Amino acid sequence: MAERAGSLGLGAALVIFGLSRRSLGSGLLALAGAGLLARGATGHCALYEKLGINSRQLNTQTGVPGNKGIRTNQSIDVRRAPSEVYRYWRKLENLPRFMEHVESVEEIDSERSRWVVRGPLGRQLEWQARIVNEREGEMIAWESLPGAEVSNAGSVWFEPNDDGGTRLKVSLQYEPPAGVVGAVAAKLLGESPDGQLANDLRRFKEILETTDEPASQS
């Protein structure tokens, strides 16, 4: 029932947004919104099938157990030493500088942090996370705490590459906001998790390779 109610709400928003703008893309959003309205009314949506989304495969509980939710993996080479790359990433308040959808990260203590993120359709989402495993200069792993609006977990590895720099490997797993409805919204609005992360890492690489900021981090 909650998912169907979410479909009705999101469908109405997409229809209104799409009809208020005269373009092919906005027209498609309006049509997609109509499909979600149908999903909310009937419990079935052909749009989900076209997008490859199965609501039975998504878990909306706290945490991201097993192979549930959305998973993405990306890597990039950075022309800085692993210790420098690690040091810059470990200062979590730096993350909004290259993560497009992250508005702020506040470090509460050595393990816990508070995140504010811009979600689908501009919705602001918040949660707390904690570092669950860390090897200085090598890796950081984290997970969201109970009550998170977006249950998520991930890891970052800082490996030496053959050129004397760093091979940065990032793995993320998360539940879309509003469960499967949020996944539909993200796909309709072009918010590909792989594309988002790849773009974020390209910005990270640019910062690290064009400034001396890692050396300035405490």
Image: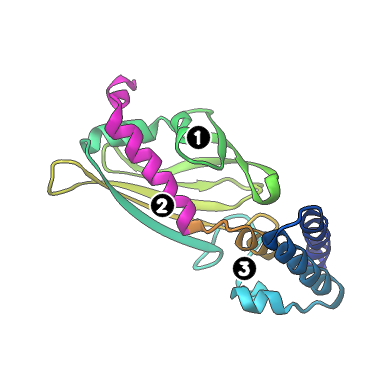
Q: Amino acid at mark 3?
A: Leu
The C terminus lies in quadrant: top left
The N terminus lies in quadrant: bottom right
- Residue 204, picture quadrant: top left
Disc marking residue 120: none
Whichever of callouts 3 and 2 sits on the residue coming sooner in the sequence is 3
Cα separation between marks 3 and 2: 24 Å
Q: Amino acid at mark 1?
A: Pro
* Residue at image location 77% in from the left, 63% down from the top: 30
Residue tagged 3: 58
Q: Amino acid at mark 2?
A: Ala
The stretch in magenta equals 194-218
Residue 157 pos. (x, y %): 31, 48
Residue 215 pos. (x, y %): 27, 23
Above or below, 151 against 66 in this view is above
Residue 211 pos. (x, y %): 30, 26
Residue tagged 1: 96
